[in-house]
């Protein structure tokens, strides 16, 4: 119905299986930061919450309301993923790659590497020939990104890149991969 679904599970759980079109913002210390950057204020929000966390629904709603995102229209437990394939269609996945595999894909011209770290981090050092779009600017920069080959997304350690991979996946990019160890592993 035009709402946005935020899956608050961990990046690894999200990457293994998620509902197509959902945005992954893990419910952690950085939840409000990335929700504030990436979630539009004029749409209803639906949350997918870890079934094993009794307080997560109230935590997520409180955190979103604190930054003015108060249009939470509903929530579901992660068990909704068990029901999705039979009732709607296949789940999506985001492959997790290490730096060595990402390098081989880039060298072979089979993928482009996208760095979603800040400008300061980029200027301090980056992967040769990588594209650079800070995570907060990613939704406004989608048109400038290549769609002719998969994107391997990385940040410093793997957290922001997982969120960025979900943004790209939700926007219809195919073959999106997360370089889970990030630039730290590349170095």
Image: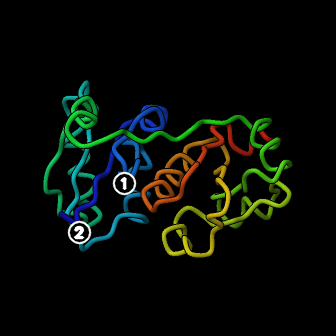
The answer to whether residue 82 is left or right of residue 34 is left
Residue 83: where, in percent of width, then height? 21, 32
Q: Is residue 14 above or below residue 37?
A: above
Comparing 11 with 61, the one in front is 11
Q: Quadrant of residue 184?
A: top right
Q: Is residue 17 left or right of residue 125?
A: left
As measured in the structure, the alpha-carbon distance from the residue carrying label 1 to the one carrying label 2 is 15 Å
Of marks 1 and 2, which one's residue comes earlier in the chain?
1
Q: How many marks?
A: 2
Please state if 155 lies on the left or on the right of 40 as rendered: right
Rendered position, 185 above or below 155: above
> Which of the two marks, 1 or 2, is nearer to us in this view?
1
Using the image, tell me which numbered label, if any, was put on residue 66. Answer: none
Rendered residue at 51%/58% (across/down): 168
The location of residue 187, given as percent across then percent down, is: 83, 41
Q: Which residue has dot 2 on it?
A: 43
How busy is the neighbourhood of tag 2: few (under 14 within 10 Å), some, or many (20 plus)? some
**What residue lies at 28% left-to-right and 35% top-to-bottom?**
85
> Residue lying farthest left?
73
Residue where numbered disc 1 is placed: 21
Q: Position of residue 139 (x, y in %)?
A: 48, 69
Residue at point 24%, 74% (across, down):
42
């Amino acid at each position: 119905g035009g709402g946005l679904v935020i899956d608050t599970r961990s990046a690894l759980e999200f990457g293994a299986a998620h509902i197509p079109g959902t945005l992954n913002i893990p419910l952690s210390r950085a939840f409000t930061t990335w929700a504030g950057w990436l979630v539009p204020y004029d749409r209803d929000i639906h949350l997918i919450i870890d079934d094993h966390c009794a307080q997560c629904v109230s935590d997520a709603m409180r955190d979103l309301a604190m930054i003015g995102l108060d249009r939470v229209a509903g929530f579901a437990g992660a068990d909704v993923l068990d029901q999705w394939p039979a009732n709607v269609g296949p789940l999506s996945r985001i492959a997790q790659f290490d730096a060595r595999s990402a390098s081989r894909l880039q060298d072979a011209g089979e993928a482009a590497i996208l760095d979603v770290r800040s400008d300061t981090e980029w200027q301090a050092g980056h992967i040769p020939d990588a594209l650079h779009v800070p995570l907060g600017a990613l939704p406004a920069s989608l048109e400038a990104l290549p769609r002719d080959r998969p994107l391997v997304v990385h940040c410093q350690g793997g957290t922001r890149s997982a969120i960025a991979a979900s943004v790209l996946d939700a926007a219809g990019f195919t073959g999106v991969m997360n370089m889970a160890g990030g630039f730290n592993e590349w170095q």
